[in-house]
Image: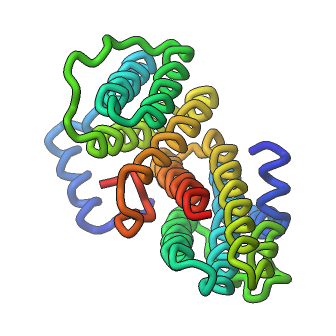
Amino acid sequence: MVGTRRALLGAGALLLVGCGPPEEAEVVPKDVLAEQLRVTKASVAALEGEPRLRARAEERAAALEQAGATAPDSTDRPADALAAVRAELASHVQAVGLLAEEQYRELFAKVIASAAADESALMPTHELTPFPGTP
Amino acid sequence: MNRRTALKLGGAALATVALRPSLARADADEGTLLLGLWRRERGAELAYDRVLYADPILAVVRSHEEDHARAIATELAAVGLNTPRAPEEPADLDFASQKLAEAGPKRGDVLAAAIALEEDLVEIYSSALPSFVDEKIAMTAATILGSHAQHLFILREVT
């Protein structure tokens, strides 16, 4: 077993008080896909003034819907298009860690590449980071 | 990992993992992929290094490749693998990186080769993503995929 002294002590303390490690929340693919579609639709709404980018966001939404995602259309129009696309990209990167099945990973690879390109279209080059979609 | 991805990543990575029978199968598969990706990032870094004069954006891209390689080396360590010797000469590189390293001196030729390299990297990361079992490694690969998609977009814009 590999672990730090602190981690081992912590694990021991948990066993002594009769509770194991916290249970992980169940991941429901339908919910994960719905969230991906929700954030993508927010990008679509935010990109109203950017027809080319909006069309690409609509393509991402269509791909998610084709995979079974459902979500209502965004009712408001976020003022900050970059913030919306950035939040969308971060959500897609997180989703990769939640769903490991091949069909989901292939879908996420497509939407990540597309959303990342759109993020770079909305920001100055010198602000690009090597790890987009992460905090 | 499909055959095409494995071929693109190179036999060296496969051979390195084959020498470590103690690795669990899942770790070995992830290790194989990570070694190949690390080698591609270091190769891209070396290639960009040779053509930095062609456009200021290439220095930004090169620094990202270096950061990617460092992040992948961290994940390699997590599955019990050390990084092998990095490529040092164009002859050590994969085809796309070699083309970029030798594309100068014309700016247009360099940018065309850089675009081809980034297209290749986007495809490789997209193909590799379904194969990662470890969620943290998968997310690292996902964000690096996003970075290469951004490089591709910007390089096409400046061409």
Q: Quadrant of residue B19?
A: bottom right
Q: Position of residue A30 (x, y in %)?
A: 43, 16
Count of marks overlaid on the render: 0
Q: Is residue B77 visible?
A: no
- In this rendering, position of residue A38 left or right of residue A98: left
**Residue shown at the point (57%, 78%) measured from the top left:** B55
Depth check: A90 or B109 in front?
Answer: B109
Q: Position of residue B56 (x, y in %)?
A: 51, 79
**Residue shown at the point (37%, 50%) measured from the top left:** A122
- In this rendering, position of residue B68 left or right of residue B21: left
Q: How is the image coloured?
A: rainbow
- In this rendering, position of residue B57 left or right of residue A121: right
Q: Position of residue A68 (x, y in %)?
A: 51, 12
Question: From the viewer's perspective, is residue B120 above or below residue A86?
Answer: below
**Residue shown at the point (63%, 69%) measured from the top left:** B41
Task: Point out the image quarter for the C terminus of chain A.
Answer: bottom left
Q: Is residue B40 visible?
A: yes
**Residue shown at the point (56%, 75%) measured from the top left:** B58
Q: Quadrant of residue A130?
A: bottom left
- In this rendering, position of residue A37 left or right of residue A82: right
Question: From the viewer's perspective, is residue A55 above or below residue B104?
Answer: above
